[in-house]
Image: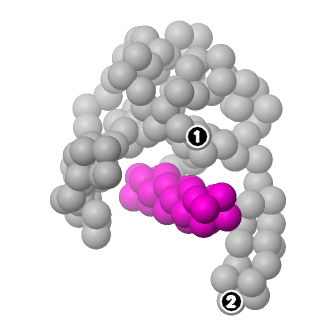
Amino acid sequence: MVYDPDLDQVIDLQPCEDAYRLYCTLPVMEACEDAQASFVIRQQSKHPRLIQESDWQTPIVVAAGAVREQTIEVKGGRQWRHVELCLHTPTDSGDTTLSFWSNLPESISASQIADLDRRRWSIEGMFQRLESSITA
């Protein structure tokens, strides 16, 4: 969903998945790609086995820390992007590094991919606060 804050409305819909690390499974990501949908999924420790990894690109400094990326290949020859955000300040869970897998095109920068996930968490946090206020 593409939201324009100036118009305060949704202006476009794009098939895309931004998911938590439990969805970092080969069948989920293959299904997204087969449906011609883009994805940004947080990497979990038991991610699908990598067949090949490129060297990391030079990190780029962003407000939250530093972002770098590499190309990864999984079974079946699918090549995706692996984006890593090294944070200045740990998350509430104590994480200092966040890793994402994505099939977004190169026209979307690694820093934009990392920012998408961080914005998702701020939105989820707002819903959790709203839910606790309603049930209180």
Write down the quadrant of residue 69 in the picture: top left
Q: Report if residue 25 lies within the magenta region.
A: no
- Residue denoted by label 1: 19
Q: Residues within 10 Å of mark 2 (few under 14, many from 20)?
A: few
Distance of label 1 from label 2 (alpha carbons): 27 Å
In the picture, measured across the screen, residue 41 lies left or right of residue 83, that is right
Q: Quadrant of the N terminus?
A: bottom right
Residue segment shown in magenta: 110-136
Q: Report if residue 123 lies within the magenta region.
A: yes
Above or below, 11 against 8 in this view is above
Above or below, 28 against 50 in this view is below
Residue drawn 42% across the image and 53% down it: 114
State yes or no: discs 1 and 2 in contact (Cβ < 8 Å): no
The x, y position of residue 9, in whole percent, is 79, 78
Amino acid at circle 2 = Asp
The x, y position of residue 80, in whole percent, is 50, 32
